[in-house]
Image (cartoon, rainbow, N blue to C red):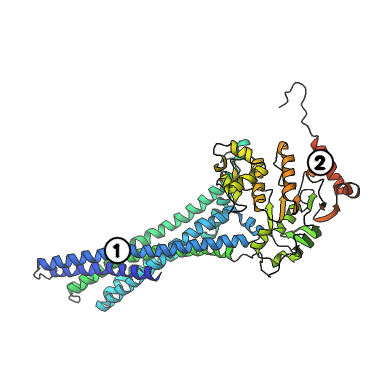
Amino acid sequence: MFNAMALLTLSALLGILSYVLVNLVVVRFLQKMPVDPGYLLGLSALLLICLWIKALTYFKGLSASHKLAYDTLLGIRRRLADKVMKMPMGAVVRRGSGGLKKSFVENVEDMELILAHAMPEGFGNALAIALAILTLFVLDWRLALLTLAVLPIGMGAIMMMFQGSVKRMGPYYEASREMNENIIEYISGMEVIKVFNQTTSSFHKFSSSVEKYKKFTLDWFHISWNYMTVYSVFLPATLLFLLPVGTLFYLHGTLPLSRFVLCMMLAMSLGSPLARLVEFFPMFPMLRQKAQKLEDILSEEEIISRDAGKKPDGYAVSFQNVSFAYGDADVLKDVTLTAGEGNLTALVGESGAGKSTLAKLLVRFWDIREGSIQIGGVDIHDLDFGTLMNLISYVSQDIFLFDTTLMENIRMGRPDATDDEVIEIAKTAQCHEFITSLENGYQTMAGDAGGKLSGGQKQRISIARALLKDAPIVVLDEATSFTDPENEDKLQEVISQLVRGKTLIVVAHRLSTIVNADTIVVMDNGKVSASGRHEELLSASPVYKRLWQAHQQSMHWDIGAKEGIANV
């Protein structure tokens, strides 16, 4: 920043100096002094050098300021990424992907204007303007005031524009955030929109948000353009009052011609830096608003992570009197359960009973309100977040694949794994056959969020990724929900083999997949209703018996067709 300011200030000063050099030539002609060709050539060469150095210092200054700016933007984006990693998932969900995308991309990118231009150029132009005005006052205070007479007109227009902008800025950015959210939702839900024959006009949520953004933008711009016209015309017109009134001074003999010409040249030199300086004024309230959005994210409450230096004694997982709420809605109430080391513990219950929430609390997507969660007798709050993640392989029901090769998607489980290790684990996870049938095999791109694969294929890739990690604790949050019947038995067998000696926690809706679990925990309305083995629960737990009967009935569901209508 220091280098940028120094170079851009020098460039601005050289711009004013070029007008002074021109003045030396003009005055010589006006005073009818003998003009030596050598003198003219020397001044011309000096002027050329002055302009060349001005351009060079401007280029070097902007190069320095842009290096500063983009290094800083890199740092801001890294800080934001680190912050989002430490924020509870509830805060991430509340902000939405559109709002976060706008902050990461647009709001951060706009900081470039103030770092690369407004601060270094603004300082240089302001200093050059101040020196030129000081020189004008030394030469003739009357002409200095006449030069500055355009400032109240231009600055008045700017201040009035600012007042209007402050009122409109909040609603404008809210409309922009809402439009971003709806655009992402619209694109993500394109399959549903097409199936139900929706269009951009009939998809009201999308079209209304775009229309709202358009209205806020054009209303703001229509008002601003009038003020912009006023200050854009008047501020650079530094000769507007100086030229006619200065001429009267000259005609009345109170102003020497040489001084009059020099003051006019200095006034003209102010036009460009003054206009450039004023260009930055509207940026500050806008950037202040965007910077506040970034500050709001960076000041979000973090999930507390501390390394107490404790090491788990084994890998049994226990929930002790755990309570948790999403906002004001209670989800878990005084839950106590233990998943034994080397055992398969299944969590079952109706939708909304709190099964997946327990799994997410273990990997600290959220922090509990009351109670404790322990691994090997150590509270997870006393483990560094990275250490905790190394202990757990987590496969969510919300599968996400990155738009890279299938090889790399699996390798994310263990980045140092060789290609052969990846292929071997893919075979074990029943992925190898369908991957090799693809045109590019393991080098096939997964597509945006894994969009090029079916649900079952994505699920098997995610399981392969978790198995490659080979963590001592494995959490499968409905990890086989998309698996086709042909491969479900194979996958269950594979999982049971690979998790031997590990602590396995399975969130299950298909009760047939967990009948052999060491412990089945029945969740009901956020509480532990019962726990035990399958046979025990059938006789001891009405809730589990009801779930089992419903599951058995669903396995025999069929689609009836009236006679004469073809079965599909």
Q: Label 1, on which residue?
A: 56
Give the x, y percent position of residue 202. Answer: 59, 40
Question: What residue appears at the point 22 percent right and 71 percent down from the top-left corner?
Answer: 262
Left or right, residue 156 beside residue 415: left
Between 181 and 248, which is closer to the camera in this rendering? 181
Label 2 and label 1: CA atoms lie apart by 77 Å
> Element at badge 2?
helix
Does residue 157 show up? no
Extreme residue toward the right, this view: 539
Residue 493: quadrant of the picture:
top right
Give coordinates of residue 126: x percent, y percent: 36, 70
Tell me which amino acid carries mark 2: His
Label placed on residue 551: 2
Quarter of image, res 118: bottom left
Q: Nearer the viewer, residue 264 or 426?
A: 426
Q: Estimate the x, y position of residue 521 in percent, counting from the top left.
A: 82, 53
Amino acid residing under circle 1: Leu
Question: In the image, what residue occupies the spot 32% across and 71% down?
Answer: 128
Is the residue marked by circle 1 packed among few (<14), some (14-19), or many (20+) residues within 10 Å? some
* Residue 151 relative to residue 527: left or right: left
N-term mark: 2 or 1: 1
What residue occupies the far front of the structure in this picture?
A: 420
Query: Which residue corresponds to the image point at 73% horizontal and 25% vertical from the top-left?
Result: 567
Compared across the picture, whether 398 is left or right of 151 comes to: right
Residue furthest to the top in view is 564
